[in-house]
Amino acid sequence: MKGGNNMATEEEKQGVSRRDFVKGLAVGGAAGAIGAMGIYSYGPWRKRHFSKVTSKNIDIGECKSVKITNISETSWFDNKVLMGDIKGSGGLLVNQYTYNWPPFADVKGQLGKGSYENGIKHIKQFLPDKLEKAWEFQKENAVHPENAGGYACLIDVELLDGSRKKILLDSGWAYDWTDECFKREGIDKMLSKKEIDCLIISHEHFDHFWGLPVTLKYNPEVPLYIPEGFYQEGLQYIKDSGYRGKLIVNKPGLTPLFPGCAIYTFAIPIICRVYGEESLYFNVQGAGLVSVTGCCHQSIIQFAETARRTIKFEKLHGVYGGLHISPFEDWDPKYDDLVIAFKNWGFEKVGCNHCTGIVTAKKFIEAGYPIVKGTARFRSKDIAYLGNGDTIEFKAA
């Protein structure tokens, strides 16, 4: 564990990997921005970024059950608008803080003309208690604030002794949408009563992290976990959002959290100038290992393979979250092999959504995989995967 003051030095150490990533995406760019979104997670060149995982068979203990409530999987509402903004700002390699997206709007309506420093000065005085005023400024000055949504889920874990742990995975994007979703699922009250044990930010992407002040509005001291690799803007945003708790920065590899649960941090370069993603493993007694992810930029293949080589468990039981295959509903024939290969992991229960893509979920269903369908409520678009307000539970039969 270490604080944010040392992150700049660590970022310099990672510079070579980041440059290699830029070269790789530049090559893949010929396929177009949309195609590169899936290709970069599953392309063979990407393997070079993963450190070699030796078999360790680490015992993380067991828990009794895991119940996940999808607070919001709709990170944005219009794919065409989002991709148009990214292309107009210079593409997938451009620093996300310069897009002039909310909440860092500066130059009114001008795409690609923003910066963290100029954007935060307009709203810092409102964070985290006066989010309505902060968002009003975004509505007037940001690029497409109406398209911002966010990703977040609540993970409710029952331990073997009957006690419970609650984890908030990610904190959305748009302040108004995230707050609406929190109130719908009672997250606001859980945070205020300090019933949520910690907030885990899977990675620095706008749709998972920029809604942080909404969480801090209700509990500014909630223990906060982030993966090593956050840029200086992200570290400063945590401070500027009014955070007063303990910040834990997870180094690459396995970090046990409590019996039956561990965080795994993947040191990987990600589009929009982001680095590092952490996901969760739960070893459910009598059921098997459950993998929970925000975006799974490391790929579901690497996620499952890392579990097999690192953790002691009987079988892979389930997975929940975004699998980052067709986030913009594009489909490359190469992904057909991924659909076929998915059965090799033997998942018994799959709750996919978000950047998995509806087209991918439907192909999984057609292939006969155990996909848990949703209800398509609260602006989720299809029942093919778990939507906003839907739940999934993993436990022994």
Image: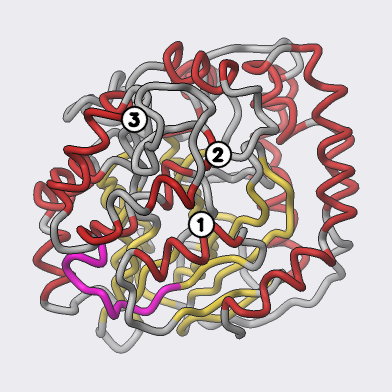
List x then y, in percent, for residue 242: 30, 71
Q: In which quarter of the image is the C terminus?
A: bottom left
The image quadrant of residue 333 is: top right
Rendered residue at 57%/82% (across/down): 3
Distance between the Cα atoms at labels 1 and 3? Answer: 25 Å
Distance in Å between CA atoms under marks 2 and 1: 16 Å
Front position among marks 1 and 3: 3
| Dot 1 amino acid type | Ser
Q: Earlier in the sequence, mark 2 or mark 1?
A: 2
Image-quadrant location for residue 12: bottom right
The question of residue 220 being in magenta is answered with yes
| Side of 115 where 151 appears, left or right | left
Real-space Cα separation, disc 3 to disc 2, in angstroms: 13 Å
Q: Determine crowd level at label 2: few under 14, some 14-19, many 20+ residues with C-alpha closer than 10 A.
A: many
Residue linked to disc 1: 202
Relative to 27, say whether 245 is above or below: below
Q: Which residue is drawn at 89% across and 36% down?
A: 45
Q: Which amino acid does label 3 sit on?
A: Ala
The structure residue drawn at horizontal position 55% and vertical position 23%, both measured from the top left corner, is: 86
Q: Position of residue 372 (x, y in %)?
A: 36, 35
Specify the quadrant that holds the N terminus.
Answer: bottom right
